[in-house]
Image (cartoon, grey):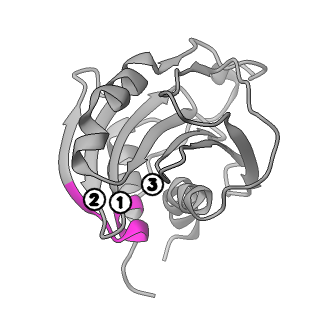
């Protein structure tokens, strides 16, 4: 088993699972690296951050979480990798597979941008319906995730407005230039054996 590939593969998915499982009582999370407009009825974002070591350096992951009264949620995740993500498609593939496995979810559809830097997914689990957008910018991975109670809600007007409003700044605030960091290869898909 390749430990560094396993760490890079599982970290974004495990961070998301942690964010879904624990709505921490933390401070609101204004951030200059992205902009998003929450649908009516959602609370202010709370912020969770963690740092995980990897052979190439630290991986810094931050989750911003907002819930509605009906239990739906919006989660924005930003992971700062220790180097440029060289192959976004492989990174998306491994992240998607780890995410689906960790949530016991089934992929319903996936669309990728022509430039290869983003993907849009619909998937479901027995407990929820999900809509997600993956984005790679240099050494940063972003995910916008909507967690809803019905297939209609995740494709309705509120969800559409949410995804239409999501914008990533050209350079995340207070981040060093990516050219000064080493490159990071896309992780391989997580193994199903122990």
Span colored in magenta: 99-107
Tell me the residue at 29%/28% (across/down): 116
The number of numbered badges drawn on the structure is 3
In the rendered structure, the answer to whether residue 161 lies left or right of residue 49 reads left
Q: Which comes before the other along the chain, label 2 or label 3?
A: 2
Residue 187 point in image, percent of width and height: 45, 54
In the picture of the structure, the residue carrying the numbered disc 1 is: 128
Dots 1, 2 in contact, CB < 8 A: yes
Residue 90 point in image, percent of width and height: 34, 46
CA gap between label 2 and label 3 equals 24 Å
Residue, far bottom: 194
Residue, far right: 27
In the picture of the structure, the residue carrying the numbered disc 2 is: 124
CA gap between label 1 and label 2 equals 6 Å
**Residue 176 falls inside the magenta stretch:** no
Front position among marks 1 and 2? 1
Q: Secondary structure at mark 2?
A: strand
Tell me the residue at 52%/27% (across/down): 38
**Residue 103 falls inside the magenta stretch:** yes
Front position among marks 2 and 3? 2
Q: Secondary structure at mark 3?
A: loop
């Amino acid at each position: 088993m390749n430990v560094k590939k396993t760490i890079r593969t599982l970290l974004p998915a495990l961070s998301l699972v942690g964010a879904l499982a624990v709505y921490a009582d933390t401070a609101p999370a204004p951030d200059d690296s992205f902009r998003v407009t929450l649908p009516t009825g959602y609370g202010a974002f709370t912020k969770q951050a963690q740092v995980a070591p990897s052979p190439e350096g630290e991986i810094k992951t931050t989750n911003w979480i907002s819930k509605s009264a009906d239990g739906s949620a919006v989660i924005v995740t930003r992971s700062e990798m220790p180097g440029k993500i060289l192959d976004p498609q492989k990174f998306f593939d491994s992240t998607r597979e780890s995410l689906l496995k960790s949530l016991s979810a089934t992929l319903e559809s996936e669309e990728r941008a022509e430039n290869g830097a983003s993907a849009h997914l619909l998937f479901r689990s027995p407990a929820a319906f999900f809509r997600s957008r993956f984005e790679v910018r240099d050494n940063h991975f972003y995910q916008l995730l909507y967690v809803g109670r019905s297939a209609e809600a995740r494709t309705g007007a509120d969800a559409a407005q949410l995804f239409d409003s999501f914008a990533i700044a050209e350079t995340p605030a207070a981040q060093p230039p990516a050219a000064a960091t080493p490159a990071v290869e896309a992780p391989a898909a997580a193994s199903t054996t122990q």
